[in-house]
Amino acid sequence: MDELNTCLRITCVHQGFELYGSDRCFVETVRTLRSAQPNAQIDVILPRNGPIVAALTPFANRVLVEPLWILRRKNLARLVTLDLLALPFAVLRAYRRLRASDLVYINTTVVADYLLASRLSPGRSIVHVHELPEGTVLKVLRALIRWSGANVVFNSHATERVYALPARATARVVYNGIAGPLEANAAAYDGSRPLRVLMLGRISGIKGQDVLVEALASLPEAVRRQIELRIVGSAFEDVGRERSLAARIDETGLSDHVSLQPFVSDPAPLYRWADVVTMPSQKPESLGRVAIEAMSYGVPPLVTAIGGLPEVVEDGKTGWVVPPGGPEPIAAALERMVADPSRWRDFGRAARARYESVFSEASAADGIAAMVRATLRASRPPGTPKVERSTRAIT
């Protein structure tokens, strides 16, 4: 791509501002773009300032905070009433960005203004699909992608199947690449101390923190005493959900075994602490970044067989895959882990090997770079004047 990278103008749009899994995936994609296009002008558009800005600053020329028209279920009533009046102006603002850019990378399908504007400036956009919606939401997002005409990157085969785009669409599956640690954890659990179980993620009914608590509560007291669980994360603008989860932990008598901790921007110490990481998701996960991160540390994941999670974990080899729908399968898996640690002593080593071969940063970078090349060759006429790189800043 050397012939292209001296004068590129790239805009990267993201709907978030924190440092949860989707946010870290976005940072890693921007880093990939910077590595592939070292002289490009890269602008990042965010809806708010937040923890993600510091992570983006080394790779972006500018991090800009601008209004975005984002499809969120929680604000749906407002979106289709008051905010609908602002949509034409949002699309016009996005169109101007598109026209001023050689490439626009749109992270997730919910950034509606940029997807709508992509139809008005064809051949410049890539949308990275991370969501696995259902019902009406799926129909709306699928229609939005088709309307946009953007090239599509799916983060899993499960996501690709759900959206079922027509064969003529330019699309490919690229697993999320994770910048893992240089060395994995040494296997440490032998049953002589409590099993350290970690759950990371935004507190919601989708993620299954409540089901995990019920699973632990259902175990015999002798087994519960052999498990230490840390649930780390915060509810997005929903303090009531966090309070409800904390109250349930107290009601079930698990306060001595379960700690509820707020979101942290650097989870590395938690992965170093854990023997097992769990994603007890009760609705489809498009892939499962936390499970991949755990594997990069040599920590086997316990996940539910839903969405893209079975693409990440090999049951009985790199971790455990159990049916969704209730606490019983999770409880049974935890009880087996405690009862016989020797049966899964090699899971961590196998998990690290699978991470390195399938989910490393290099693997994802190759896939993203291939889609970028295809998009640029179709969109960018020869002889475009060079853009000088500006000082990095947030405005």
Image (cartoon, grey):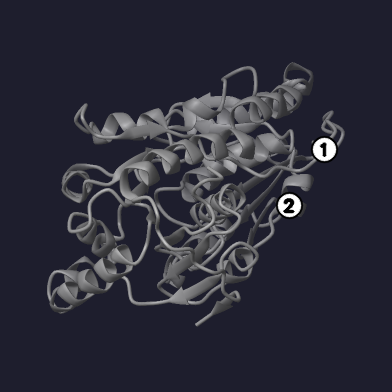
Asked whether, in this view, residue 208 is left or right of residue 2, the answer is left
**143 or 329: nearer the eye?**
143
Q: Which residue is drawn at 18% across and 54% down?
A: 119
Residue 86 visible, this orientation: yes
Tell me the quarter of the picture where residue 336 sits: top right
**251 or 311: nearer the eye?**
311
Q: Residue at x 18, y 72 (%)?
A: 87
User: Residue 242 location, x and y as percent?
Assistant: 49, 65
User: Residue 81 location, x and y as percent?
Assistant: 12, 75
Asked whether, in this view, residue 73 is left or right of residue 336, the answer is left
Residue 268 shows which numbered tag? 2
- Which amino acid is tagged 1? Glu
Tell me the quarter of the picture where residue 183 sits: top right
The mark lying in front, picked from 1 and 2, is: 1
Q: Which residue is drawn at 58% across and 38% down?
A: 291
Q: In this view, does 10 lie above or below 293?
A: below
- Which amino acid is tagged 2? Ala
Q: What element carries label 2?
A: helix
Which is nearer the N-term, disc 1 or disc 2?
1
User: Residue 162 location, x and y as percent?
Assistant: 27, 33
Residue under pointer 1:
183
Q: Is residue 270 above or below residue 191?
A: below
**278 or 12: nearer the eye?**
12
Q: Which residue is drawn at 57% across and 47% down?
A: 36
Q: Is residue 31 above or below residue 321?
A: below
Tell me the quarter of the picture where residue 265 sits: bottom right
Q: What element carries label 1?
A: loop
User: Residue 231 location, x and y as percent?
Assistant: 61, 53
